[in-house]
Image (cartoon, rainbow, N blue to C red):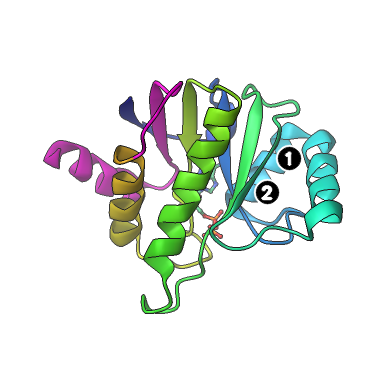
Amino acid sequence: MTITLHQGDITKLEVDVIVNAANSSLLGGGGVDGAIHRAGGEEILAACRKIRARQGGCPTGEAVITTGGKLPARYVVHTVGPVWQGGASEEAELLARCYRRALELAEGVEARRVAFPNISTGVYGYPKEQAARVAWSAVRDFRATHLREVVFVCFDAENFSVYERLISEE
Ligand code: ADP
């Protein structure tokens, strides 16, 4: 499985699965969540509502999968990253679990290419360098079956330069 880097808007990517940094309500929000629901249309929200009716939202560190609606991606995995609280509240473990659970759900639909945003590094306030190291090792250590490529999509310049550095250290 190769790991690649892309700077830009995750909603534009033609991959099997894009991952959403959702909140536990699954009802949409700002940041990448808002962008995905805007670009993907009502069908994604309807699917999220159904899941919410069944299981009452999504806990931190867990993930659910829906259609990609009007997106070029076939599916969206919605995962709920931890809110940064200083680092002593299991943030790293919860963030790693987001990446692993998303990859497991992607494997479940036999995805070959999956794209991740930089979960928790927006309004949830996770320090970008630390989040990138957690993301990187969770993905690198994942035992893939169908997956061939994981794309880290960096929207902001700071995340992009952090990931560029990580890639060059490999
Ligand atoms: P969280 O609540 O998990 O922090 P945010 O959506 O606030 O989620 O931010 C997560 C990351 O998503 C941030 O690094 C932000 O720069 C990035 N982001 C925002 N919009 C997009 C987009 N359209 N495509 C990819 N990444 C995005």
Q: Is residue 111 shown left or right of residue 128?
A: right
**Disc 1 element:** helix
- Residue 161, numbered circle: none
Relative image position of residue 40 (x, y in whole percent): 73, 33
Question: Callout 2, which amino acid?
Answer: Gly
**Do the numbered discs 1 and 2 sit on residues whose CB atoms are within 8 Å?**
yes
Counting other residues with Cα less than 10 Å from the Cα at mark 2, is it few (<14), some (14-19), or many (20 or more)?
some
**Distance from label 1 to label 2 (Cα)?**
6 Å
Report the residue at 70% width, 29% height from top. Answer: 68
**Disc 2 element:** helix
Q: Is residue 41 magenta?
A: no
Frontmost residue, 7 versus 140: 140
Relative image position of residue 84 (x, y in whole percent): 45, 72
Q: Is residue 3 shown left or right of residue 76?
A: left
**Is 38 situated above or below 80?**
above
Q: Quadrant of the N terminus?
A: top left
Whether the residue carrying mark 2 lies under 8 Å from ligand 1 is answered with yes
Q: Quadrant of the C terminus?
A: top left
**Is 68 situated above or below 121?**
above
Whether the residue carrying mark 1 lies under 8 Å from ligand 1 is answered with no
Please provide the residue range marked out in magenta.
Answer: 142-170
Q: Is residue 166 magenta?
A: yes
- Residue 38, numbered circle: 1
